[in-house]
Amino acid sequence: MTRRTYCFVAITFSRYRLHLIAALLVGTMIPVAVARGNDGASAPFNVSTPGNVDGLKNLQAQVKRVLSDILPAVVAVSSSAASSNPAEKLPMEGDRFATGVIIRSDGLILSQHHVSHRGAYDDETGLIVWGKSGDHVDVILHDGRHVEAELLGAFQHADLSLLRIREPGTYPFVPLAEENSVSLGEWVVKPGHPGGYQKSRGVVSRLGRVVYHNHVNVIPDCMITGGDSGGPIINLNGQILGINLNSAVPRSVSLTASTVRADSMLAFSTVSKIQEQMPTMLAGGVPRDIDFREWDERNKFYREVPDVLPSQSWRNGEQVTGAWRNTTLGTQGCVVEVLGDRYPVAYGTIVGSEGWVLTKASKIGNNPRCRLPGGEIVSSRVTGVDAAFDLAMLKIDTRKLQPIEWSSKQTHIAGTLLAAPGIAGKPVAAGIISVPAYRLKGPFPKLVEPAPLPAVPAPLMPEILGKPFEEQGFAVSFSTGRAAKLGIRPGDVISEIDGRPTRSLHDIFTILKGKSPGDSVNVVLTRDGRRVEHSLTLEPELYRGDTGAPSQNFPALFEHDIPLSPEECGGPVIGLDGKALGITIARGAYGCKAIPAAAIQPLIDALKTKRSAANEP
């Protein structure tokens, strides 16, 4: 999970949690859980793992095609509370809108109960007045038109809802897939309006794979946040596999996610569950009774450590990112790390052979140091800053460096595959263009405000699950990531760490909590009746799914879903031809913002001599 090239070995602990993620415009999502499938050698391409650039090109073609087909059917849905309050002017955009998808040509929209039917608090009665069948809400179509939709029925337990556009017409739609047709490892796209509807940005798309499913839940490894509520996951045949549900995922899923840069994951209600409730919802029914049998059944599945897609096959697992290696090797020597007191604060992109480096201005000090591709740490100085783009030019003296090669492509198409190379030329992570390049009007900052300093990394915790074993130790029932690579496997009984008895995950966490990255610990375990000892050096936990600082708007940008940390902004993102499409400049809650190459290139010479517009008097 780290983005630095360390010689550390480590085991990692899950940050699993069963809290419910609230959409930005609503209260909580309500939990529940699709049928198992095979991932055999003869599976169609949409469940296969690309092994090389040709495989990635095939995947890219499918993703682009399906997005062009389905995006016109993805809409923004306002809450019934906002739409029904005459005293409150309905905003044209913002976080009162979440997501829905048209599933029939007559304008039938599938969304979530807490999006379209959520309650409004009535000051006079002191009660929550829920949206009901026949109420009207505002819907924004893909082309930006506002239309009224009538609420039909909803099913609160599975957090599903239906509504229909009132204006007669023939609308683009995405059909539901066949029931129980999902496959483990299947590639999916997640369109939606994270953070609420934004006209300048439009629909945001993210790529993922199905990493777990049973007969009521599907879980992909897409990046998701508030405002995505009500949105679907769609297979590469252009069919809906599920609708957002909640963040209650099996522990083995969340544990594996921590090893492959997957965060903000949600479970989705399956087509089977949607079809089961469709007649009631079409008739306008909104049942409130909750049947807890499904909750109990889901929890049983989750407790049994269910089958999960192997970590190497996840969207950013070793197999998928490995397909990029020959492409990113061309960037070897083109990326540096910009250092703070102890740890990296940003990446830098080499833009001139005589030591010119572009990086994120708000993350660096006046005299930053750079770690070069060979590992040498050298001093540098800031020669120019563009506050609007949050870019700074650094000069490293008398160094022959390898500049990045810029792409000549002026268009950025949603679904284009891209990767972020690291300092050694290896892919840090990969993803797709989520939003094509667009421009904003401003005003934009004229001064750079320093971003908060990164927190000192904590040591990674063990990527294992298990339970106490007869007062003898902690019996491992599941291991993944670095823990599995180090040889810790199901059936092992860990008896002590650093000489301290270990009987539970809590014990392990307590023992390692006071440690620092770089510390070594001794692990004693029993395997098949034999005593085994490991000496482990703890690796720092550098990747975090937070933004590091509020993300500003920029004069020109495109968005992508590569899960980078704030300390990895400032580096290039490249396409399948190995050329840089732009520089990642900010991490957000659902992806990253990048400055297009066409906007960067005219700034380079000016920033070498402080002639950027932001610095002129």
Image: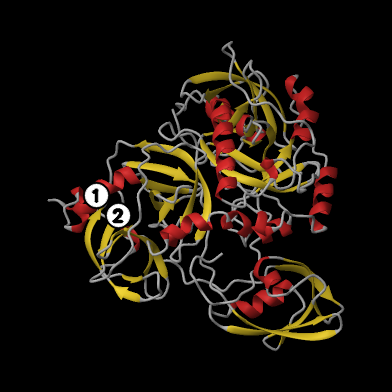
Point out the tag, 2 or 1, that comes first from the N-terminus. Answer: 2
Assign a secondary structure to mark 1. helix
Image spot of residue 527 (x, y percent): 82, 80
* Cα distance between the residues tagged 2 and 1: 9 Å
Q: Residue 137 or 45: which is nearer the viewer?
A: 45
Q: Identity of the amino acid at label 1?
A: Leu
Q: Residue 8 or 93: which is nearer the viewer?
A: 8
Residue 603 tag number: 1
Q: Where, by quadrant of the figure, is residue 316 drawn?
A: bottom right
How many marks do you count on the picture?
A: 2
Assign a secondary structure to mark 2. strand
Q: Residue 362 or 569: which is nearer the viewer?
A: 569
Residue with the most extreme bottom position = 499
Decide if residue 13 is in sight here: no
Image spot of residue 77 (x, y percent): 56, 29
> Quarter of the image containing the N terminus?
bottom right
Residue with the most extreme top position = 168
Residue 391 tag number: 2
Picture layout, residue 40 above or below residue 517: above
Residue with the most extreme left position = 617
Decide if residue 54 is in sight here: yes
Q: Are marks 2 and 1 in contact (CB under 8 Å)?
A: yes
Residue 588 tag number: none
The coloring applied to the image is secondary structure
Q: Residue at x 65, y 77 (%)?
A: 510
Q: Identity of the amino acid at label 2?
A: Leu
Image spot of residue 358 (x, y percent): 31, 58
Q: Is residue 474 left or right of residue 402?
A: right
- Mark nearest the camera among 2 and 1 is 1
